[in-house]
Image: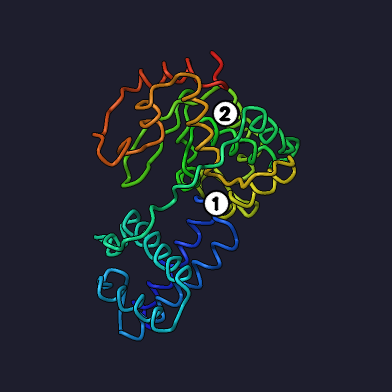
């Protein structure tokens, strides 16, 4: 296998990691998407396709045509179409391809199911699960508090450095390396401070600058956070499909429920648009801080 064809497999591996950790897809969905897309990649390799950037609409049409010729059930073909669309949407977002080759495919809207939201009581129960008498518990409490207090994407959290958090904000580099400042509440700041003082200090910060580390002193990744969230959700007896992204949905919903302006929430989440037609609205850091103090339930004055 050449270096170029390896890019197809690496892109698929990144995508599977994405739908598992950020989208919280079920094991059945992950297995089905993986199976469909591995079949697609197999077809692409037989046509000497070297990377996803080389894929054309004709290649995708030929693959779907092959499925129809093989008498696949309509539901299976529809699932394959959706898997392809979600894959290429991800590849475009990550900058792996310049254009979304699958954009023309006529399929149902993607990811339109109602997101899982945790209630205030469920959030409190989940945040209380880590055992803060141990370094890993301190780390996990800081991660959970930060996810809920800031609404960060799990990939953004994993990329935080030691100095990304100050006494008011977390500095985040989101999609397209766009920087934003998100205000933090006292609970999250205390959790991060406790982690830095009593757990993170066990590692040589000169070697690794990432904020959250594994037991081995390596930067924690999306799968690691996903597994950690699943563990504490099970421990808390929360019978919902919960992923790191659930904290992001809950963050936004609780702010909205408490009267926060939708465009301020948009800025905190790092969304380029409120909808596909709305213009991106800039909000000053002062407005963000004022809205956060007013509306977020875990914010307490210093």
Give the residue number, with chain letter if any, for mark 2: 188
Q: Quadrant of residue 202?
A: top right
Query: Helix or strand or loop: what does disc 1 sit on?
Result: loop
Query: In terms of depth relative to the viewer, which is nearer, 24 or 198?
Result: 24
Q: Which mark is residue 24?
A: 1
Question: Residue drawn 58% across and 57% down?
Answer: 26
230 is higher (above) or lower (below) than 7: above
Instruction: Name the front one of labels 2 and 1.
Output: 1
- What's the CA distance linking mark 2 and mark 1? 23 Å
Question: Residue drawn 50% across and 19% down?
Answer: 258
* Number of other residues with Cα within 10 Å of mark 1, as a class: few under 14, some 14 to 19, many 20 or more: many
Expressed as whole percent of the image width and height from the top left, the position of residue 79 reads 46, 65
157 is higher (above) or lower (below) than 181: below
Q: Quadrant of residue 271?
A: top left
Query: In terms of depth relative to the viewer, which is nearer, 114 or 279?
Result: 114
* Number of other residues with Cα within 10 Å of mark 2, as a class: few under 14, some 14 to 19, many 20 or more: many
Expressed as whole percent of the image width and height from the top left, the position of residue 156 reads 45, 44
The answer to whether the residues at label 2 and label 1 have Cβ atoms under 8 Å apart is no
Say which quadrant the N terminus sits in: bottom left
Question: Residue drawn 50% across and 30% down?
Answer: 253
Q: Quadrant of residue 31?
A: bottom right
């Amino acid at each position: 296998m050449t270096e170029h064809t390896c890019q197809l497999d690496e892109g698929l591996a990144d995508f599977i990691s994405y739908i598992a950790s950020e989208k919280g897809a079920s094991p059945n969905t992950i297995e089905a998407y993986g199976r469909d897309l591995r079949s697609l990649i197999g077809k692409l390799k037989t046509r000497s396709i070297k990377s996803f950037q080389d894929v054309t609409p004709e290649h995708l049409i030929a693959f779907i045509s092959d499925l129809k010729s093989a008498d696949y059930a309509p539901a299976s073909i529809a699932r394959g179409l959706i898997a392809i669309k979600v894959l290429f949407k991800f590849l475009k977002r990550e900058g792996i391809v310049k254009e979304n080759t699958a954009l023309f495919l006529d399929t149902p809207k993607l990811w339109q199911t109602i997101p899982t939201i945790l209630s205030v009581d469920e959030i409190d129960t989940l945040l209380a699960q880590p055992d803060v008498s141990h370094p890993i518990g301190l780390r996990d409490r800081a991660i959970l508090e930060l996810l809920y207090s800031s609404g960060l994407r799990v990939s953004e959290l994993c990329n935080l450095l030691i100095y990304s958090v100050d006494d008011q904000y977390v500095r985040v580099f989101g999609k397209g390396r766009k920087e934003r400042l998100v205000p933090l509440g006292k609970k999250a700041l205390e959790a991060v401070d406790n982690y830095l003082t009593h757990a993170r200090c066990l590692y040589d910060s000169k070697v690794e600058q990432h904020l959250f580390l594994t037991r081995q002193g390596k930067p924690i990744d999306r799968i690691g956070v996903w597994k950690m969230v699943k563990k504490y959700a099970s421990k808390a007896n929360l019978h919902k499909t919960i992923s790191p992204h659930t904290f992001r949905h809950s963050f936004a919903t609780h702010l909205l429920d408490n009267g926060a302006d939708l465009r301020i929430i948009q800025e905190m989440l790092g969304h380029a648009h409120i909808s596909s037609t709305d213009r991106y609205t800039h909000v000053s850091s002062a407005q963000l801080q004022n809205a956060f103090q007013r509306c977020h339930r875990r914010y307490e004055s210093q």
